[in-house]
Amino acid sequence: MISKKPKIVQLVDSLSMGGTERMSVNIANSLTEIGIESGLIVTRESGGLEEYLNPAVKKRIFNKRGKFDVFTFFKILKHLRSESPQVLHAHQTSIFWAVLLKKFLPKTRLVWHDHFGMSEQLDQYPRKEMDWLISSIDVVVTVNEKIEAYWKNRFPVMKDSIYFIENFSGKWNINPKREIDSVFKMINIANFREQKDQITLIRSLKGLKEKIGNYKVYFLGEFVEKSWFKKVEKEIVDQGLQETTEIVGPVVNVTPYIEMAHVGILSSESEGLPVALLEYGMGALPTIATNVGQCADVLGQGQFGELIPVKSPEALHQAILNIFNNYSKAIEKGYLFQKQTEENYGSVNFFKKYLPIALPDFMVKKAYPQPA
C-alpha cells in the first residue's frame, strides 16, 4: 500500500491538436478527480490543448530542440527527481527519452502508451528500436487489439505486461437537437496526413448536391503533412467543390462544430482508436467511419453508425445518402452511440483497467470520474 498520495507524471511531445495529445490531457485531468497527483511534462512545445488542462495538473513545458538536446534532458530529469513520481507514463515517441530517464529513476514505474495509428500496416512499420527499449518498460498500453497482439507476439516475455485499454473522450455537456435545415453539414476531424485520407471524402461528394441539395463539409485538423494538405486543396479545386467545402484548419474547441453538424465522418485508411470518433459519440452525432483499427467496435459493428471500406468514395457517397434519407433513424443511432461511448469509452472504463497495472499497490479512495 502506498502511504502517501500517489503521483503519475506523463511525458508527451506537444499539446497540439492530435489524438495522442488529447488523451494525455484527458488522463491528466481525470487523475486529479480520483485522488492521484497529476503531472504533465511537455517536451517540445505547447499547443491549443493547454487551455483545457485542469489547474490542478502540474504541468511543465520544455522546448526540446532535438533528440540530442542534452541540456533539456537534464532539466527534465531534475524536475522528475524533485517530483519522485510512482509512474512515468510516456506517450508514443516520448518513450525514447522516457527510457533514458528511467535509468536515473529506478524506483519509478515506466508505462508506454502506444497510439500508433497505422495498425493496418504494422508489419510495414516494425519500429526496430523497440528491441532495445522494451526491457526498460514495465507496462505497455495499446489503443487497439491489433497493436496489443502484435507486441505480445513480438515480445512474448512481456505478454503479461501488455494491455489494450480503450481511449476515452473528455466530458461533454451537450445534448443537441438536430434537424436538417437549408444546408446539410458534415465535419471531418482529422489532421491533414495521408493516413487520414481526406481525398476519399472529397471524391465521395461528386454528384451529391443533385441528390440532397445544399451541403457543406468542414475539415478540422492541423496541417501535419504539408504535401498531403496541398493534394487535398488541389483535389477540392479539381472536383469543383470550393463552394461546398471549407478547410477550417486546427480548432481547439471542436464542440461547436459537433453541435452544428448533421454527420461526422472519418475516411482514414488506418487508425488505432481515434479520439475524434469518441468525440462524435459523446456529441450523439450520426457517424460514418471506415472499418479500420477499433472503429467497428466503437460503432458496435455498425449498430451505432455507418461502417464503410477504405478508399471507397462510392461506399462513402452511399453512406451519406443513407443518413440523409433516413435522418430520424440516424439521430436514434446517434443517441445510442452516445450511450455506448459513455459506458464503454469513458474515463471510468479506462481507469478501472489502467490503475491496477500502473499502480498495483494503490487503492482508489475516491469514486472513479463519472461520465457527463
Image (cartoon, rainbow, N blue to C red):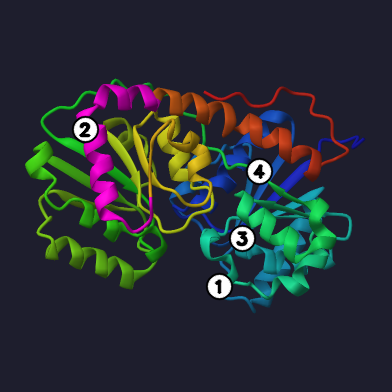
- Cα separation, mark 3 vs mark 4, equals 15 Å
Gap in angstroms between the C-alphas marked 1 and 2: 38 Å
Q: What's the residue at 43%, 50% (across, down)?
A: 48
- Badge 4: few (under 14), some or many (20 or more) residues near its Cα, within 10 Å? many
Total number of numbered discs in the rendering: 4
Q: Considering depth in this image, is 22 or 267 the residue closer to the camera?
A: 267
> Looking at the image, can residue 113 be seen?
no
What secondary structure predominates along the stretch shown in magenta?
helix
Q: Where is residue 368 in the image (x, y as percent from the top left)?
A: 69, 26
Mark 3 or mark 2, which is nearer the start of the sequence?
3
**Which-is-in-front pick, marks 1 and 3?**
1
Q: Residue furthest bottom?
A: 68
Left or right of residue 365, residue 27 in this image? left
Which range of residues does the magenta coloring cover? 309-334
Residue at image location 41% in from the left, 59% down from the top: 269
Q: Which of 55 and 135 is in front in this view?
A: 135
Residue matched to label 4: 165
Residue annotated with mark 2: 324
Quickly name the residue at label 1.
124
User: Which residue type carries mark 1?
Assistant: Gln
Q: Give the left or right position of residue 259, taking residue 173 as reference.
A: left
Of residues 82 and 6, which is closer to you in this image?
6
Residue type, numbered disc 4? Ile
Q: How far apart are marks 1 and 3 (CA)?
A: 17 Å
Q: What residue type is labelled 2?
A: Phe
Q: Is mark 2 on a helix, strand or loop?
A: helix
- Vertical comparison of 253 with 314: above or below: above
Image location (x, y in percent) of residue 36: 74, 36
Closer mark to the observer between disc 2 and disc 3: 2
Q: Is mark 4 on a helix, strand or loop?
A: loop
Q: Is residue 202 visible?
A: yes
